Amino acid sequence: MEDDAALVTAGAQGIGLACSAALIDAGMHVLMIDRDGKAGREAVKTLGERAHFIKGDVADEQLIAQAAKQAAQLGRGLRSIVSNAGFMIRKPVARLTLKQWNQVLATNLTPAFLLAKYAAPLIRTSGAMVLIASSRSVQSEPDTESYSATKGGLVALSHALSVSLGPKLRVNCVSPGWIDTSEWQRSDKRKAPKLSKEDHAQHPVGRVGRPDDVAALVKFLLSDEAGFITGGHYLVDGGMTRKMIYVE
């Protein structure tokens, strides 16, 4: 991965920042797309000369096309893509407007399609793409229909793309569970985690997740060590979705 380039959406904070840091640590150039300009500038300063930033909304088709071209000019060329952007509108489905539904799809699901359309063809020889979904793709809380639909869509899109874009591009999906990002925000929003013993105890591994837990798997899936892995879906949730919980 040394001197290759990666494109990471929502790459300046949270899980995206952890992925950017892990890939830079592997010797890659990373172009982060983020709508938060201050977070992007801080990330570049912190991560060093291999970190690059473009401000914008991942729902903007022209921005994705521009970022793909820019990433392809870094280092030895574009090799890796991480589609990470997402947000939730939590509202009863009867009160959820069509506009809000479309806003969630435009940020959470459509950018993965745009990255496949504009960035994947620029992969220099062979490479890999990881879509960041959520454990909400396999389980739900009330009033999360738009978010859950997009995350389930990312799981399906990843295996569809793995068939259509292989063998040049491997495509996998990672679904984080409860990941505390409190310490991975821009400086004026950063804070110490506020987690209880009960929060940690819900997880069979004994703790809530951290962004670098997700980034470690993303880095592996993008590497040559994962060269025989494509179309997969991987939960990073501390075992929480495997634990049966009954109200006593």
Image (spheres, rainbow, N blue to C red):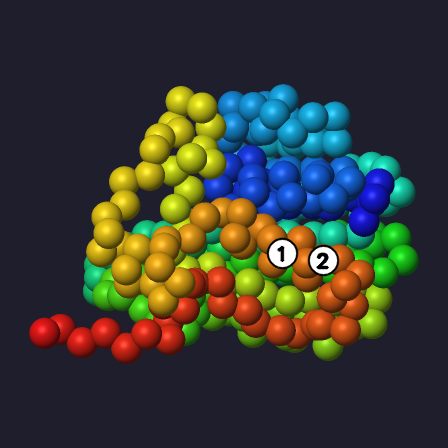
Q: CA distance from mark 2 to mark 1?
A: 6 Å
Q: Is residue 236 above or below residue 243?
A: above
Q: Which mark is residue 222?
A: 2
For label 1, the residue is 218
The crowding category of the residue bearing disc 1, from other C-alpha atoms within 10 Å (few below 14, some 14 to 19, many at least 20), is many
Q: Which mark is residue 144?
A: none
Answer with the quarter of the image where residue 51 lies: top right
- Where disc 1 sits, the SS reads helix
Q: State yes or no: discs 2 and 1 in contact (Cβ < 8 Å).
A: yes
Residue 44 percent across, percent down from the top left: 64, 26
Q: Is residue 217 above or below residue 229?
A: above
Q: Looking at the image, how many numbered discs can be counted on the residues?
A: 2
Relative horizontal placement of residue 33, taking residue 89 as reference (left or right): right
Relative horizontal placement of residue 90, taking residue 148 as reference (left or right): left
Q: Is residue 114 above or below residue 77?
A: below
Residue 137 percent across, percent down from the top left: 43, 69
Amino acid type of the residue that numbered disc 1 sits on in the rendered structure: Val
The residue lying at 49 percent from left, 62 percent from top is 236
- Where disc 2 sits, the SS reads helix
The crowding category of the residue bearing disc 2, from other C-alpha atoms within 10 Å (few below 14, some 14 to 19, many at least 20), is many
Q: Is residue 5 above or below residue 159?
A: above
Q: Nearer the viewer, residue 164 or 22?
A: 22
The residue lying at 48 percent from left, 41 percent from top is 14
Answer with the quarter of the image where residue 12 lies: top right
